[in-house]
Image (spheres, grey):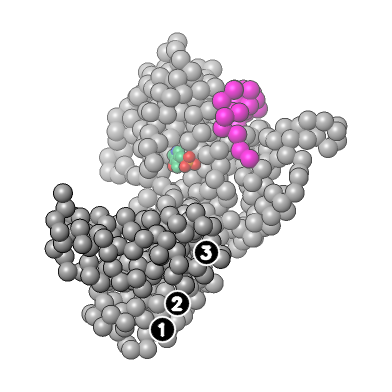
């Protein structure tokens, strides 16, 4: 039984009906569903009731019961209940392929095709020449073959699905030979040994963590072997006393034994990124040329397209994958194909691709360019800071590719570093993150850093407004 003070407080809680009559709530009812308004009132009252019961002596309850304040809280609740959970954010982290922030930004050309193809009907599975049912898999195949030099191609939901499908198709119940140095775990619980098990294949580890030789592959092959597999060690590097076997050599061993050689490339770039200071990321073409019979890679990592898993390789292998019933479960929709085909077509002109595909454009941005952008952003932030509460500087820093690509290569960038004695770095970071749109930066050396490499030019205004709001909020509380 609650004590008399608590009972008195609970008795004074306004009723749902009383709150519904408040002018601001009535106005909200005119534009929002009644169910949502009632739910907001209920949540605010429940939360307050809980606080009173848990801590009856707290003097703050007096002011908590103020109707004005309650209505304010109800409107806040309503706004958050009514908003989308998936929303745009400003990526100021400098991580270009940021899986948590949606990975690749689509090129304008891809957005146009999406708009055109998804707002109306299309020939997704219709053969216009024959006037009958066709296959959705023809749409990206020809251009994938053209760009990679492979004989056949198939697109599924993501690269994890592509790996699963190839292994299930070629190695269900049989052994797959992989170097011990390549038993990768990618974020989001994709681990080669686990995917192998799910596919029905049996992992045969060969070599050691740091060194695997051709003779190790030879020794790993037996009557039960289905194929040899190479996995791109996307998110780590083994350095020091190391030896690996290249695709050319591994494929030659596989072929001598009448077996296929496959490679999970992870990112799967189409262009050589070394001119931008990014060394050692193999291209899909390299892997195909070296003799891989199937190569799998993501559509939304370095390729800069929509989420997809792409398989390119020998016609016979791709056809077997297409006939696997799993393919139906892993199939891509028209949105993916529309955006992917448009992105792939941009690669016909490599220089154009670097200009038009946001992922490549961001990676190619030079320090000079970034310096200029950082200065412009810094000056916008300073304009928002009329009371001179912020210390705003442009500093050199490092961006990352992300998405598991090129793990230990940092790319030189410029960041806007913001600090404030009176506000505090954590508070600045949190205020930016709770803005609409949220601005996601990072904290280093007690400064809030905004890396301009991943901030789009039209987002500068949103960042300035976020600072304006934050500073207006702190002015109110001082
Ligand atoms: C990222 C990655 C995957 C998974 O690709 P998704 O497209 O995210 O499913 C698989 N293998 C490697 C080596 C990777 O880097």
Q: Secondary structure at mark 1?
A: helix
Q: Which residue is mark 2?
A: 465
Tag nearer the camera, 2 or 3? 3
Measured from the top left, where is residue 435 in percent x and y?
41, 68
Q: Is residue 302 above or below residue 430?
A: above
Measured from the top left, where is residue 65 in percent x and y?
28, 68
Q: Is residue 323 above or below residue 79?
A: above
Quarter of the picture holding the C terminus = bottom left
Marks 2 and 3 close (CB-CB < 8 Å): no
Task: Check if residue 398 falls in the magenta segment.
Answer: no
Determine whether, in the image, residue 187 is placed left or right of residue 163: left
Q: Earlier in the sequence, mark 3 or mark 1?
A: 3
Q: Which residue is mark 3?
A: 29
Q: Which residues are magenta?
A: 312-333
Measured from the top left, where is residue 298 in percent x and y?
52, 43
Q: Earlier in the sequence, mark 2 or mark 1?
A: 1
Q: Residue at x 55, y 38 (%)?
A: 157
Q: Residue at x 58, y 56 (%)?
A: 106
Determine whether, in the image, residue 41 is placed left or right of residue 325: left
Q: Residues within 10 Å of mark 1 (few under 14, many from 20)?
A: many
Q: Which residue is mark 1?
A: 384
Marks 2 and 1 close (CB-CB < 8 Å): yes
Marks 3 and 1 close (CB-CB < 8 Å): no
Q: Measure the alpha-carbon separation of dots 3 and 1.
A: 35 Å
* Outermost residue to the top: 223
Q: Measure the alpha-carbon separation of dots 2 and 1.
A: 7 Å
């Amino acid at each position: 039984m609650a004590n008399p003070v608590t009972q008195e407080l609970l008795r004074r809680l306004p009723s749902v009906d009383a709150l519904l009559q408040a002018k601001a709530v009535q106005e909200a009812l005119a534009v929002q569903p009644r169910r949502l308004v009632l739910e907001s009132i209920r949540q605010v009252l429940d939360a307050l009731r809980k606080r009173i019961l848990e801590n009856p002596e707290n003097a703050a309850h007096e002011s908590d019961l103020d109707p004005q304040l309650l209505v304010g809280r109800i409107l806040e609740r309503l706004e958050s209940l009514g908003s989308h959970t998936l929303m745009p954010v400003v990526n100021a982290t400098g991580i270009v392929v940021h899986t948590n922030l949606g990975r690749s930004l689509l090129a304008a050309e891809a957005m146009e095709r999406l708009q055109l193809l998804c707002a109306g009907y299309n020939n997704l599975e219709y053969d216009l020449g024959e006037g009958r049912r066709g296959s959705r898999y023809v749409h990206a195949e020809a251009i994938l073959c053209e760009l990679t030099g492979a004989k056949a191609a198939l697109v599924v939901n993501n690269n994890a699905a592509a790996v699963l499908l190839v292994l299930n198709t070629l190695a269900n119940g049989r052994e797959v030979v992989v170097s011990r140095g390549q038993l990768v775990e990618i974020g989001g619980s994709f681990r080669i040994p686990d995917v192998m098990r799910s596919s029905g294949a049996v992992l045969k580890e060969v070599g050691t963590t740091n060194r695997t030789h051709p003779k190790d592959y030879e020794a790993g092959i037996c009557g039960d072997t289905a194929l040899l597999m190479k996995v791109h060690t996307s998110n780590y590097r083994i350095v020091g006393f190391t030896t690996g076997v290249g695709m050319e050599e591994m494929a030659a061993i596989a072929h001598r034994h009448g077996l296929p050689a496959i490679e999970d490339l992870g990112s799967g770039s189409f262009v050589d990124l070394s001119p931008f200071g990014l060394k050692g990321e193999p291209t899909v073409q390299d892997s195909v040329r070296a003799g891989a019979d199937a190569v799998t890679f993501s559509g939304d990592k370095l390729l800069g397209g929509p989420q997809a898993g792409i398989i390119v390789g020998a016609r016979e292998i791709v056809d077997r994958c297409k006939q696997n019933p799993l393919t139906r479960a892993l199939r891509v929709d028209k949105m993916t194909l529309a955006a992917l085909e448009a992105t792939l077509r941009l690669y016909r002109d490599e220089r154009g691709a670097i200009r038009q595909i946001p992922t490549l454009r961001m990676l190619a941005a030079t320090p000079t360019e970034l310096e200029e952008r950082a200065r412009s952003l810094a000056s916008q932030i300073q304009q928002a800071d009329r009371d001179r509460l912020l210390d705003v500087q442009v500093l050199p820093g490092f961006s990352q590719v992300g998405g598991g690509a090129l793990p230990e290569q940092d790319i030189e960038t410029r960041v806007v570093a913001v600090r404030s004695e009176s506000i505090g770095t954590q508070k600045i970071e949190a205020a930016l993150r709770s803005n609409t749109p949220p601005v996601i930066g990072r904290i280093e050396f007690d400064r809030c850093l905004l890396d301009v490499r991943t901030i789009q030019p039209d987002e500068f205004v949103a960042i300035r407004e976020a600072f304006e709001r934050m500073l207006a909020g702190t002015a109110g509380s001082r």
